[in-house]
Image (tube, rainbow, N blue to C red):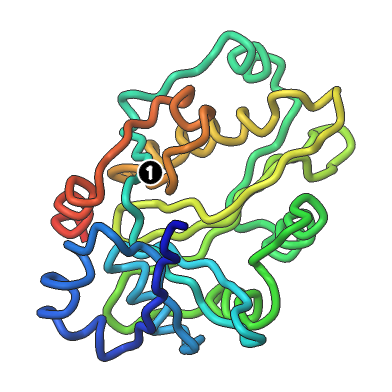
Amino acid sequence: MAKKQILYLIGQEELEDKNILFNYIYPNEKSNYYLSDDFSKDFYIKLAFYGFITTSISFENKFYLLPEIQFEYAILDFGNLHISKKIKKLLNQNNFEFSINKDFNLVLENLEKYHKTNWLQDKYKELILSLVDYVHPTIDFEIMSVELYDKDTKELIAGEIGYKINSTYTSLTGFSSKEKKYNNWGKLQLVLLAIYLEKENFSFWNLGHPYMQYKFDLGAITYTRKEFLKRWLSQN
């Protein structure tokens, strides 16, 4: 029987102790997930700053943050962006409206409808909402929502939430309509976001786990944790 992974607790002390972070957490190739009951805004932002992508989990009847320092990351450099013929056709039809931070709450509502199992709930959702207008004193962090509307009906068809740290963007979670007439609009939203990020001089896009084909179709490349951290920490 395979051994279960031990979930270690992590808090402000571990993040701020460079010895623990750089000599125990980062090099540990057997652990990627950690637990924390610290739902403060500054702690969440520091986790993001140090390369963790944080979701949530209910564990032994208690709700926790679930920071992950991933084993691998999917990274998109905008020079590698691939736009398929189907997406080029949708771009040319121009029957959409693309926006950033126009309706954060509506994006959250659609995410809840789209994902049957949703980690964006409870205290985690409250935390994310509290970050919308929050300015960290030392870290250039911004929570972001991305929206893609049908130009005619004004209906929200696809979107996502993520965050900016300095000149990097990290995706958290997204959705797209399952209606047949909106086939490929989820991919359209991704392409439009990549174009926007490049235009706004972002350095690269962190797409998180490299296990979904659409990320590679977009042009992303897999980075090991070591490769990712070398680039991430030099950037941030």
**Residue located beneath label 1 in the image:** 205
The furthest residue to the top = 85
Which of 212 and 176 lies nearest the eye of the viewer?
212
Left or right: 188, with 2 as reference point: right
Please state the total of marks drawn on the protein image: 1
Which amino acid lies under the numbered mark 1 shown in the image of this protein? Trp
Q: Residue 56: image x %, image y %?
A: 57, 71
Which quarter of the picture shows residue 5? bottom left
Q: Callout 1: few (<14), some (14-19), or many (20+) C-alpha neighbours within 10 Å? A: many
Task: Identify the residue shown where x is 69% and y is 45%.
Answer: 175
Task: Identify the residue shown where x is 24% and y is 57%.
Answer: 29
Q: Residue 114: image x %, image y %?
A: 78, 50
Left or right: 25, with 106 as reference point: left
The image shows residue 43, relative to residue 167, as above or below, that is below
Which of 76 and 137 lies nearest the eye of the viewer?
76
Task: Identify the residue shown where x is 31% and y is 33%.
Answer: 77
| Quarter of the figure with the C terminus | bottom left
Task: Identify the residue shown where x is 48% and y is 32%.
Answer: 215
Which of 149 and 24 lies nearest the eye of the viewer?
24
Q: Residue 143: image x %, image y %?
A: 50, 65
Left or right: 92, with 42 as reference point: right
Which of 158 and 36 lies nearest the eye of the viewer?
36
Which quarter of the picture shows residue 12? bottom left
Secondary structure under the numbered disc 1 in the rendered image: strand
Q: Residue 172: image x %, image y %?
A: 53, 56
